């Protein structure tokens, strides 16, 4: 009996966990100080995979259920139009964090904020249908697969909030920063990376948003050999990681799992790894390394910094 | 299930035990030789048996030796201990409850451990340390024992004495309640979902020697106690009244068996998460081979459980290498068809 409960429970958790793998918060370095100067033209109509949505006038009570979207909204200067953000949205400072959940959305709770636009990273629990029946437009922005998807989502948020000009500027600035970092980055050829999502060795392949950052740098990702093993987020064997002896280890599990360069060095069989001996084990804020928003530039910069260390 | 295989003489059973020891040895050897990283077989054999006279040849280089001794060997050892614990507690529960569907998680051990693990993952920073001790295994260990403890208390209170039906029903209620609390805690802390999920599916992935050392005392103690109770369980199989007329005190025997089996389950769950299927299938498979005597089922379950989990983990490590499969998936996908086959064959013989 317990097994029946358990298996349906696991299925649900799996769905949510996978969503969580992809969920990310974009953030903006300069705090989204720009005011809404470009009024934009409303109504705005968007074609989305969930059907067309129309936003009649400039929204002033946005509810964001996606930590990435929250970061993007503030970055494009729509921060003062945001009425509530979900429990995972912890950036930027000043975002109106509530106990709303993007994983287990509660339509009634969302409605209590009187939203005129809801942004989410997924359509969990019939969210889109529930809200649209009540006339609330819902924009779903799923986990990006590539940087271009991020840019597209930022522009889309610019469109629906009346901040297209600022959104374009944000995208242009991000592009320029990425180009500059890539131009000055040391060649990644011959280097290998292991990106750690948690202390049971879940990792990311190059097919994921985070994984493509390593591809852009020309660094070989040791998780790519496990591409068949789970939708871009395979669980690796410890002995495989030790055998591949990656030149760079990136820990995105400091917050969730208390991992650090010191705990990595203390793992059985890991202390003689090249990355451990060279000090090329870096911890990156879990959120920055999992959201597909503006702060991906910071992630890129941190990785390049570590590469400079390990290639000299 | 109380069928006696004709001709299952004592000698035959001794032969089966010897064969089972052989299987465990071979499975462990396979577990050491095969993995996502290919190690030279003669090198591994040299590492293992180099201390024997007349064995010569080259060992492994440093990194390969590290992989063998620090990563692969502890995992095989842990699979042995966890597999033995789960199978032996399953056998003991089935005997004590005279119920073929009993498994190690019958009295709420899984739900309790799940709650303990979730609280540990939420409270600590995942595998964080309290006073130098890993929090997660201790929390799941305690959770499992608390779950069984509540079920036993409730079940005992229900019938005036601890009847098996009362205990089983109490176990169902306690498990549902604890699972609900666990789900609630988890929903309130959705950022820990993936960790909780990974734990629930069971894993031997992060095993080091530390885990083996952590559970070995509990495992040894419980298995020894259960081995000593095999004959008593056979007498209990006649029914509580008949066992009473043989001078046994059924409720006391049952308590001893439940405590020992729960300790073994808690130890297994603490380091490996929830691995299903081993505790129910292995004892039944053994029963099909040697008949219904618990004196033989209990030790054979320990051996076969160890071999089964070592092989299941071997598959978990290699099928999608260098990725890993959750071991719970493997135990059920290999175990279920194998068991069905065994049932069919047994049906044809009788």
Image: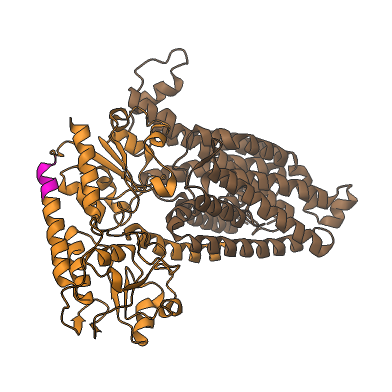
The residue at 29%/42% (across/down) is A194
Whether A22 is drawn above or below B21: the answer is below
Which quarter of the rendering shows the N terminus of chain B? bottom right
Judging depth in this view, the residue of A206 and B348 nearest the camera is A206
Residue A58, percent from left and from top: 24, 80
Q: Which residues are magenta?
A: A180-185
The residue at 49%/43% (across/down) is B128
Residue B141, percent from left and from top: 61, 46
In the displayed structure image, the side of residue B334 where residue B232 appears, left or right? right
Whether B251 is drawn above or below B13: the answer is below
Judging depth in this view, the residue of B222 and B17 nearest the camera is B222
Judging depth in this view, the residue of B167 and A168 nearest the camera is A168
Q: How is the image coloured?
A: by chain
Give the brown chain's letter.
B
| Residue A261 location, quadrant | top left
The residue at 56%/57% (across/down) is B343
| Residue B191 location, quadrant | bottom left
Residue B147 inside the magenta-drawn segment: no
Residue farthest to the top? B53
Judging depth in this view, the residue of B16 and A180 nearest the camera is A180
Residue A229, percent from left and from top: 32, 52
Q: Is residue B94 visible?
A: no
Secondary structure mostly seen in the magenta stretch: helix
Which quarter of the rendering shows the C terminus of chain B? bottom right
Give the orange chain's letter.
A
Residue A183 inside the magenta-drawn segment: yes
Whether B233 is drawn above or below A60: the answer is above
In the displayed structure image, the side of residue B66 where residue B140 appears, left or right? right
Residue A231, percent from left and from top: 30, 57
Q: Is residue B196 visible?
A: yes
């Amino acid at each position: 009996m317990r097994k029946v409960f358990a298996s349906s429970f696991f299925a649900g958790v799996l769905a949510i966990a996978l969503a969580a793998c992809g969920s990310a918060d974009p953030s903006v370095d300069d705090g989204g100080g720009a005011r809404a100067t470009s009024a934009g033209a409303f109504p705005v109509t968007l074609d989305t995979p969930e059907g067309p949505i129309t936003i009649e006038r400039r929204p002033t009570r946005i509810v964001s259920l996606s930590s990435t979207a929250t970061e993007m909204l503030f970055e494009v200067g729509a921060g003062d139009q945001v009425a509530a953000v979900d429990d995972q949205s912890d950036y930027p400072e000043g975002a109106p964090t509530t106990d709303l959940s993007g994983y287990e959305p509660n339509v009634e709770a969302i409605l209590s904020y009187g939203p005129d636009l809801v942004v989410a990273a997924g359509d969990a629990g019939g969210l889109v249908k529930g809200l649209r029946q009540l006339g609330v437009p819902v924009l779903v922005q799923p986990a990006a697969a590539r940087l271009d998807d991020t840019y597209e989502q930022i522009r889309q948020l610019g469109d629906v909030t009346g901040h297209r000009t600022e959104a374009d500027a944000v995208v242009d600035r991000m592009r320029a920063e990425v180009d500059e970092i890539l131009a000055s980055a040391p060649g990644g050829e011959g280097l290998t990376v292991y990106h750690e999502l948690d202390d049971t060795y879940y990792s990311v392949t190059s097919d994921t948003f985070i994984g493509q950052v390593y591809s852009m740098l020309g660094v070989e990702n040791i998780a790519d050999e496990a591409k068949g093993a789970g939708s871009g987020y395979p669980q690796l064997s410890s002995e495989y990681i030790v055998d591949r002896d990656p030149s760079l280890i990136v820990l995105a599990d400091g917050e969730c799992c208390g991992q650090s360069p010191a705990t990595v060095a203390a793992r059985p069989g890991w202390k003689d790894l090249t990355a451990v001996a060279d000090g090329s084990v870096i911890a990156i804020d879990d959120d920055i390394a999992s959201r597909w928003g503006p702060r991906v530039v910071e992630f890129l910069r941190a990785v390049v910094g570590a590469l400079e260390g390990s290639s000299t | 299930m109380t069928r006696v295989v004709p001709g299952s003489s004592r000698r035959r059973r001794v032969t089966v035990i010897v064969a089972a020891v052989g299987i465990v040895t071979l499975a462990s050897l396979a577990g050491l030789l095969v993995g996502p990283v290919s190690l030279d077989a003669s090198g591994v054999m040299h590492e293992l048996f180099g201390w024997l006279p007349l064995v010569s040849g080259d060992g492994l280089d440093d990194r390969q030796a590290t992989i063998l001794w620090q990563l692969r060997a502890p995992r095989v050892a842990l699979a042995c201990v966890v597999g033995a614990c789960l199978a032996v507690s399953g056998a003991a529960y089935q005997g004590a409850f005279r119920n073929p569907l009993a498994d190690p998680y019958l009295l709420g051990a899984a739900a309790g451990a799940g709650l303990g693990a979730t609280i540990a993952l939420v409270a600590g920073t995942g595998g964080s340390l309290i006073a130098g001790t890993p929090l997660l295994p201790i929390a799941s260990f305690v959770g499992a024992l608390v779950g069984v403890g509540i079920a036993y208390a409730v079940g005992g209170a229900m019938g005036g004495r601890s009847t098996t039906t009362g205990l089983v029903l109490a176990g169902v209620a306690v498990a549902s309640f604890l699972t609900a609390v666990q789900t609630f805690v988890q929903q309130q802390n959705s950022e820990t979902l993936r960790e909780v999920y990974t734990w629930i599916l069971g894993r031997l992935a992060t095993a080091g020697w530390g885990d083996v050392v952590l559970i070995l005392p509990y495992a040894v103690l419980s298995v020894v106690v259960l081995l000593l109770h095999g004959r008593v369980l056979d007498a209990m199989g006649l029914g509580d009244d008949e066992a009473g007329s043989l001078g046994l005190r059924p409720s006391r025997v049952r308590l001893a068996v439940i405590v020992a089996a729960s300790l073994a389950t808690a130890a297994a769950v603490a380091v490996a998460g929830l691995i299903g299927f081993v505790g129910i299938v292995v004892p039944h498979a053994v029963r099909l081979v040697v008949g219904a005597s618990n004196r033989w089922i209990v030790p054979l379950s320990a051996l076969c459980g160890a071999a089964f989990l070592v092989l299941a983990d071997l598959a978990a490590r290699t099928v999608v290498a260098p990725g890993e499969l959750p071991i719970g998936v493997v135990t059920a996908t290999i175990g279920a068809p194998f068991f069905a086959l065994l049932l069919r064959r047994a049906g044809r013989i009788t």
